[in-house]
Image (tube, helix red, strand yellow):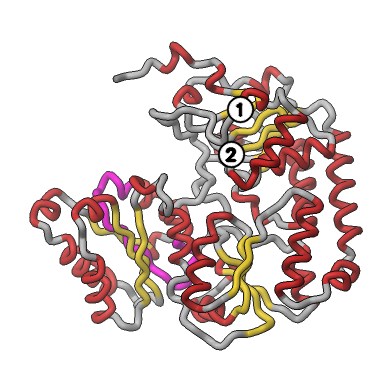
């Protein structure tokens, strides 16, 4: 049945006051809208993090369009190839042969063999029951010097227990092999963006003789392989947990989930936990790192900025941070007027934070992003507010119509007290300078670069 979107463009179903929200999934979905804010990473961008690798996508031509454009935007199509699946190959039932011969043709045509090949199969291969064990077995025999990585381009699994995104992050580390453990080496696992140097994490670990490894900063495959020697995997993004669990089972690497946080006390608890795991004296670390001073500096910066932006409204969206409600709570406590959060669901990890916001800010609005009526909802709030709307995240900028926004995805590499201090600087800059919103938010995989 066709829907006339303009007949019911506005209403309670396009925004709910927090006082009205009674579940972690308050919106009902069917037909979905995709806003033209493309900064979130796709599986193409994630795959590019594996150094000295080549990607091969095997799917129908219509499906290939999006991933081809993603690779082209990065300016590195030389690391990207495709194998088209047509009707004849489906009817003849020779998908395994097509993949094997197609990959062989691609590899033989490259100037040099890559260290790794990420092979993406699609929905049709799952429907047809393509035997990927045969495929990878033959490819490993033909090209033993290449590490083959199984990947999915499978939208039908988007809402399963293991969607393509976390599966892709997990598979990035599948080529790591057992190695002697280095007691003074730590990995950061599962991020798309390297943690910024503003984080006190670097100061804490490097002052105590630890080196930090991150696939986001590996310059070549050899450096990537050294990640297998780390004693601990630190996970800061919830989508990185499957990767850490797999490495724990396969390589015996201990792991800990210390997510990005915008709560002063919780950040302190994270550092206490990390210190205990690394057998460091927490009190000495806290004092030597001048953590109390950094905490106070970040809090003062936020409160001062809130005073300077007293006439402004703030909107946050879930693509900017894995903890949008935590960010909102921090800003509210520091004196900002947060009026909208754009998120389709509420993570169970933020349930308590949401309950606090619901009690303290019952009139704050929770707005969906993929609900079909958002396609025709007027994006005039910023104009009605006299231009004084500060958005954190691309979707918030798009839906509010503001040109003052922090262009950030997945917390932008911010972490700890230093991360909050840098966030204050980014917000101050966003309020003072207008951005070309339409141009910026169309860049796919914001912050992605190829190695």
The residue that label 2 is drawn on is: 346
* Residue 112 can be seen in this image: no
* Residue 44 can be seen in this image: yes
Residue that appears at 69% across and 82% down:
184
Nearer-N-terminus badge (1/2) = 1
Residue 123 x/y as whole percent:
28, 50
Residue that appears at 56% across and 72% down:
218
Q: Nearer the viewer, residue 127 or 321?
A: 127
Query: For the N terminus, which image quadrant?
Result: top left
Quadrant of the image occupied by residue 330:
top right
Q: Are marks 1 and 2 in contact (CB under 8 Å)?
A: yes
* 123 in magenta: no
- Compared to residue 303, the image places residue 373 above or below, namely above
- Compared to residue 412, the image places residue 311 above or below, namely above
Residue 225 x/y as whole percent:
51, 79
Q: Which residues are magenta?
A: 47-65
Residue 281 x/y as whole percent:
83, 75
The residue that label 1 is drawn on is: 21
In the rendered view, does 386 fall on the left or right side of 234? Answer: right
Residue that appears at 73% across and 63% down:
197
Q: Residue furthest top?
A: 7
Q: Is label 2 in a helix, a strand or a loop?
A: loop
Between the C-alphas of marks 1 and 2, the distance is 10 Å
């Amino acid at each position: 049945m066709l829907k006339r979107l303009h007949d019911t463009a506005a209403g309670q179903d396009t925004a709910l006051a927090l006082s009205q929200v009674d579940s972690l999934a308050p919106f009902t979905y069917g037909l979905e809208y995709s806003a033209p804010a493309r900064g979130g990473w796709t599986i193409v961008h994630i795959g590019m993090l594996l150094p000295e690798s080549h990607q091969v996508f095997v799917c129908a031509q219509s499906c290939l369009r999006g991933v081809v454009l993603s690779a082209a935007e990065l300016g590195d199509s030389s690391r990207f190839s495709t194998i088209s699946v047509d009707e004849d190959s489906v009817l003849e039932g020779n998908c395994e042969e097509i993949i094997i011969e197609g990959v062989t043709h691609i590899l033989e045509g490259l100037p040099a063999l890559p260290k790794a090949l990420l092979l993406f199969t699609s929905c049709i291969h799952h429907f047809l029951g393509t035997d990927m064990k045969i495929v990878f077995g033959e490819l490993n025999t033909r090209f033993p010097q290449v590490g083959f990585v199984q990947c999915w381009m499978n939208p039908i699994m988007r809402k399963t227990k293991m969607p393509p995104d976390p599966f892709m992050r997990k598979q990035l580390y599948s080529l790591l092999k057992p190695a002697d453990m280095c007691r003074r080496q730590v990995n950061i696992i599962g991020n798309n963006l390297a943690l910024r140097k503003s984080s006190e994490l670097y100061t804490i670990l490097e002052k105590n003789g630890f080196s930090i490894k991150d696939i986001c900063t590996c310059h070549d495959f050899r450096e990537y392989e050294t990640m297998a020697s780390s004693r601990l995997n630190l996970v800061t993004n919830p989508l990185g947990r499957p990767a850490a669990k797999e490495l724990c089972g396969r390589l015996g690497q201990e792991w800990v989930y210390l997510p990005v946080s915008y709560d002063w006390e919780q950040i302190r608890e994270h550092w206490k936990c990390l210190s205990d795991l690394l057998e460091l004296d927490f009190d000495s670390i806290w004092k030597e790192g001048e953590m109390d001073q950094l905490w106070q500096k970040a809090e003062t910066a936020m409160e001062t900025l809130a005073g300077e932006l007293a006439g402004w409204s703030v909107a946050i969206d879930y693509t900017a941070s894995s903890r949008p409600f935590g960010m909102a709570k921090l800003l509210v406590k520091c004196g900002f007027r947060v009026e909208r959060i754009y998120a389709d669901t509420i993570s169970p990890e933020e349930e308590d934070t949401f309950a606090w916001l619901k009690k303290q800010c019952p009139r704050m609005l929770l707005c969906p992003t993929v609900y079909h009526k958002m396609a025709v909802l007027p994006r005039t709030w910023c104009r009605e507010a006299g231009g004084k709307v500060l958005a954190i995240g691309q979707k918030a900028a798009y839906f509010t119509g503001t040109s003052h926004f922090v262009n950030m995805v997945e917390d932008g590499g911010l972490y700890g007290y230093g991360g909050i201090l840098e966030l204050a600087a980014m917000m101050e800059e966003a309020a003072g300078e207008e951005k070309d919103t339409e141009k910026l938010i169309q860049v796919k995989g914001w912050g992605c670069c190829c190695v």
